[in-house]
Amino acid sequence: MTIELDPVDVITVGAGWTGGIVAKELAQAEYDVVSLERGGERSTEDWLTVHDELGYALRYKLMQDLSRETITFRHEPGETALPMRRYGAFLPGTGEGGAGVHWNGITFRFLPYDFEIESETIDRYGEEAIPDDMQLQDWGISWEEIEPYYDEFERIAGISGVAGNVDGERRDDGNPYEGPRSNDYPVGPMMQSPPLERFAEGADAAGYEPFMQPSANLSEPYENPDGVRLGRCEYCGYCERFGCEWGAKSDPTVTVLPAAEETGNFELRTHSNVVELLYDEDARQVTGVKYVDSRTNTVYEQPADAVALTAYVLNNVRLLLLSGIGEPYDPETGEGVVGKNYCYQNMGGSATGYFDDEEWNLYMGAGALGASFDDINGDNFDHEELDFLHGGNVAINQTGERPIANNPVPEGTPSWGSEFKETSLEYNHSRLEISCQGAVLPFRDNYLDLDPNYTDDYGLPLIRMTFNWHDQDYALAEYGSDVCEEVMAEMGADRIDASGGLEGDFDIIPYQTTHNTGGAIMGADPDESVVNDYLQCWDARNLFIPGASAFAHNSGYNPTGTVGALAFRAAEGIEEYLESPDLLAEAES
């Protein structure tokens, strides 16, 4: 039996950063908003005993239950995909706040180059610079159009940082390569610890331009435009995979969701697992959603005038495919859009330095306490003689060396026994690592679809990921590794272990990053994209899909700043649609 509920103005499917931003903006505009979150409730009180590394960092208390729903994975279209039964390469969160609770807090803006990457690449290097199987495309939005939404997200989240370009005016200590900003960061940068200072000196000596990276771990107390007060970071080191008991790491549960609730126009329903978007293909609209209360297995239909699909990347794409919205992508023909341009993050370039006569207190730290440089990111350097496009952000991060996982030893050291123990103690506070977080560009054979063999708890097909590295990725990682090694040498390390780049096929077993992107990408052409520049679905005009699933490729940065900007853009679009129901952007002719 299915229970049909009274209609509401807006539904968000998920209550993380994207769902929370959309809910806040629409509730403040006097619309009735319901957020459906399949996990449970959360608040800062839940984190008073959060410094449990075994439970949260290694047993994944905040993550999706893979025994009920997982993904399947393969390297190539001709292979049979197998389920991911244990967490590995990435960690999708669940519950109120979503991944916005367990994130580190690194909050970059993408480069202006990213949004018009195909056009700019062709203009500078010619069409022959783009490999035949690389599906590079512009996003359908310019830097000038998206910049105000970046600013809005940073002010709501209280991002700490130092600007390098305000209204075209270059500023010392900031990122000289960032796009022109309308305002400085709302809060000053985090402290520069001795390891970060050493990195800055080494990078400068090597000819690069380092800066303190932007952070949602707040350097000082802050009150945002909604009157929400956020605390100051205590540098405890329990950020990634943990919630913050001080409310000093900006997340949806301490910013946008309380602001939405304060309006009286917002309802959060937890343990509500959306299994279908109710789609009227003739009308090109969704009429609402179907969801299951996981505590009682009761099935509900919730009608709405507009729906924001604001779940995790992989779940957004899965719901579109399960609901028959849009044409599924076909890698053989290159036709279709849903599932197209799946991208991961290239973490293959790094260098670890061991210092015989120096040590630092590496247990202190924060998720986004770091310094970096952008000299080899985007198109900030000449690619004419290189065999890859784009690049990566090179950084050192002092995230806090928690005791269980902190056993750094040089290459060649046994992985157990007395020599391992002795060497581990010797370098416990005498090892620094720098890494290049590289872009991943879209290829024809990297995509998402529904698995024909495996289902979830409800008997619905799992999402299937088909992904592998390409020559582009190997070349970028090798270049980034060489730069990391160069900087580490300037930092004075006595021994350096450089990664040398990526090796072999993509390995889904070890953790790398949770930066999955694509599958419901944005653009100006409905034949090449799922949503327009307002994140409005071409095939269902009252369906909006913000989030990293809209990225047409993945940049050399953490995605959350761009996710936040697109959510504010989508919220504006939803309000415009509710006032005058129609497509908000015309298709490219």
Image (tube, rainbow, N blue to C red):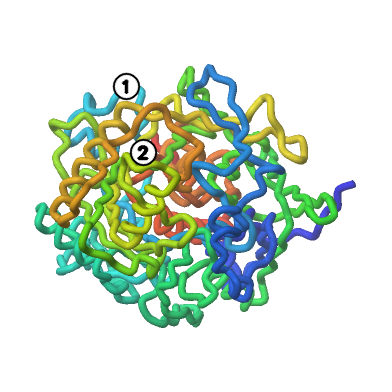
Q: Is residue 548 above or below residue 131?
A: below
Label 2: which secondary element: loop
Q: Percent x, y for residue 587?
A: 44, 39
**Can I make out residue 282 in this image?**
yes
Q: Is residue 167 visible?
A: no
Q: Amino acid at mark 2?
A: Val
Query: Is 311 placed left or right of 126 in the picture?
Result: right
Residue drawn where x is 16% and y is 57% of the image: 491
- Residue 132: give its label: 1
At horizontal 12% and vertical 58% (from top left) the residue drawn is 204
Tell me the crowding category of disc 1: few under 14, some 14 to 19, or many 20 or more residues within 10 angstroms, Cα based: few
Task: Tell me: residue 111, above or below residue 439.
Answer: below
**371 or 226, nearer to the observer:** 371
Q: Nearer the viewer, residue 466 or 238?
A: 238
* Residue underneath mark 2: 440
Q: CA distance from mark 1 to mark 2?
A: 16 Å
